[in-house]
Amino acid sequence: MELMTVIAAREIHDKEIAFVGTGLPMLAAMLAQLTHAPDCVIVFEAGAIDCRLSQLPMSVGDSRAARKASTLTGLFDVFSTVLQRGYIDVGFLSGAQVDVYGNINSTCLGDYQKPKVRLPGSGGACDIACLSKRTIVIARHERRRFPERCDYLTSPGWIDGPGGRESAGIQGGGPEVVITDLGVMRFDDQTKRMYLSACHPGVTREMVKENTGFDIDVSRAGEAPAPTEEELLILRDRVDPEGIFLKKE
């Protein structure tokens, strides 16, 4: 979890506007703000915009998420005024399934009419997937979670490859990186298929292939850079000192 958080934080650039959800994205945004991206703007769907976190909120609706916010508004305003007007640079997503083109399923497993499992659904995820300039996907790396195609498309990635988003009327955006507990995946510029960009320390390419439900290109994979001492110190002592999300042993 620490490595995933650090990698996710590094994906946030200074002065970017980041749409952040509860859990690991929140930790990553806070770490980014305390390290390499002090002027990144954090937006929470509950209505806090441009906040300066000093304590880790339990959720996006926690009052601590509003600390020193330049604007306090509501969910409708965040989605309509900020996201739909194209101001979000990077959004964080997750789901029960992530397929080879970065499409996400958070609706159901199996047939939609007779699902094996009914899931919570989109919430605001589809809006974030369509309207952010780029998205970061975070997920546990399991074979069942990474099928060739999702059982149901809740939030579009590259849909069916090059031109898929344009054909669906989606302007710009798209998934840029998928961060898991085994490695980092990105998308080929030509095919839009997911490939392994880096393995976490101690993880082999074979382990990634065994835990991925589609044929993934691992030929370009290196090793993900380890967290620095400064990143770990800030993460452990300032971002999540109580081990709320980063469970302490």
Image: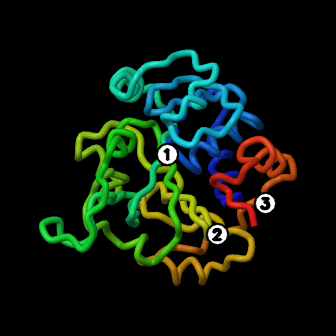
The residue at the point 66 percent across, 45 percent down is 9
Residue type, mark 1 in image: Phe
Question: In this view of the protein, which residue sits in the foreground, 129 or 77?
Answer: 77
Q: Residues within 10 Å of mark 3 (few under 14, many from 20)?
A: few
- Secondary structure of the residue carrying numbered label 2: loop
- Secondary structure of the residue carrying numbered label 1: strand
Left or right: residue 195 compared with residue 242: left
The residue at the point 43 percent across, 63 percent down is 193
Residue type, mark 3 in image: Ala
> In this figure, which colouring scheme has been used for the structure?
rainbow
Left or right: residue 85 compared with residue 208: left
Q: Quadrant of residue 180?
A: bottom right
Which comes sooner in the sequence, label 2 or label 3? 2
Query: Where is mark 1, residue-wise?
Result: 92
Specify the quadrant that holds the N terminus: bottom right
Query: Where is mark 3, residue-wise?
Result: 226
Q: Residues within 10 Å of mark 1 (few under 14, many from 20)?
A: many
Q: Are marks 1 and 3 in contact (CB under 8 Å)?
A: no
